[in-house]
Image (tube, grey):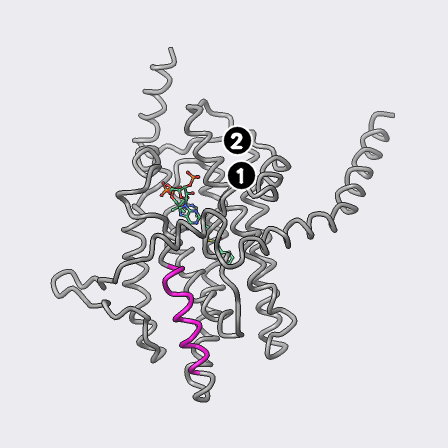
Amino acid sequence: EDAEKMANFQTRIDSEDRIEANDWMPEAYRRTLVRQISQHAHSEIIGQLPEGAWITRAPSLRRKAALLAKVQDECGHGLYLYAAAETLNASREALMDQLMEGKAKYSSIFNYPTMTWADIGAIGWLVDGAAIMNQIPLCRCSYGPYARAMIRVCKEESFHQRQGFEIMMTLAKGSARQKAMAQDALNRWWWPSLMMFGPPDTDSQHSDQSTRWKIKRFSNDELRQKFVDATVPQAQFLGLTLPDPDLRQDEVTGNWIYGEIDWEEFKQVIAGNGPCNQDRLASRRKAHEEGAWVREAAAAYAARQASRNAA
Ligand code: FAQ
């Protein structure tokens, strides 16, 4: 009977049917989605921290308002994504505990420090640019609640990318010191941005199954290449140089061929040994503890409402 269910499930996937929360699904499909969606949610939540550090130091009121809105959007994305994971019977509290105990993964990129204001430009331009490249195909993911969440997330992300590019543009067209600051930020964020797409296809353990289930529509290397091809002309437009001496355009395909990625650095960051891993988790734990009174008040309010309704 299970074999028949499995076959029917794959037929639905193959015919581009959306799987919804109450539909039958293989346990491994559910687990894969909880893994990916929760890692994605954690990335949004931790992803607030590098930029959050610059809200009080933004160079103007206008920059501050835009950055504040962006960081709030990231919080909202994290919350939709936890809600999408809950439709798969995952407990939000358990997922958050795993994050705070250092047992859950989140994107490697958020373990790098934001040293100058130009980093805020580089994050919007490159990190949100990479996030959009990866998330647009997720709008067609086979699991309905995740796919629908991605539509709104992508709209907001494209605003984030534009605000980052505009910061870079202002700096790149500014004084020599401002341009140097933009170049320095690009030098530091370029390679970590390429690592966001995950290990090379040959080392990606989940890709084959996730592609069969139409969770993934493009491979890690395919998306990384699309990102490089989209970003090289933008760097040229800014008059900045990508920190890759091997970068060259393939005459036949037009693709930009990039140099070797430091996969050892990637492994170290994922293993918890990046420049800011400890700091990010400590900040998250502190925020969670400081928010305890809000959760307690909300629970007390809900209990009172429930007892009133029962009376
Ligand atoms: N960092 O077999 P694969 C954002 C892990 S955007 C850390 O290839 P898969 C927006 C992977 O989880 C960033 N870990 O895995 C924003 C797996 O570990 P596991 C978040 C990574 O799932 C912008 C193992 O390596 N976006 O937050 C990374 O098929 C600005 C093997 O890898 C998403 O999460 C990495 N870079 O493909 C916020 C998008 N790469 O679970 C604030 C949704 C791989 O076996 C500011 N996720 N790993 O222990 C995905 O599309 C996929 O999960 C991939 C990885 C493509 C990331």
Q: Is residue 180 shown in magenta?
A: yes
Q: Amino acid at mark 2?
A: Leu
User: From the image, which quarter does the C terminus lie in?
Assistant: top right
Residue 218, x across and y down, in percent: 30, 46
- Which residue carries the number 2 mark? 88
- Residue occupying image coordinates x 25% and y 62%: 259
Q: Is residue 116 above or below residue 124?
A: below
- Tell me if mark 2 has few (under 14), some (14-19) or many (20+) residues whose alpha carbon lies within 10 angstroms of its own: some
- Residue occupying image coordinates x 36% and y 62%: 191
Residue 269, x across and y down, in percent: 45, 52
**SS assignment at label 2:** loop
Front-most of residues 299 and 179: 179
Ligand 1 neighbours mark 1 (CB distance < 8 Å)? no
- Which residue carries the number 1 mark? 84
Residue 111, x across and y down, in percent: 50, 57
Front-most of residues 232 and 103: 103
Residue at the far top: name it.
Answer: 1
- Residue occupying image coordinates x 29% and y 36%: 208
Per the model, the C-alpha gap separating discs 2 and 1 is: 7 Å
Q: As drawn, is 167 to the left or to the right of 196?
A: right
Instruction: Determine which of the numbered discs, if any, sits on residue 196 in the image.
Output: none
Q: Amino acid at mark 1?
A: Ala
Residues tagged 2 and 1 counted as in contact (Cβ below 8 A): yes
Q: Is residue 185 above or below residue 142?
A: below
**SS assignment at label 1:** helix
Start-end of magenta stretch: 179-193
Residue at the far left: name it.
Answer: 252
Q: Is residue 67 above or below residue 241?
A: above
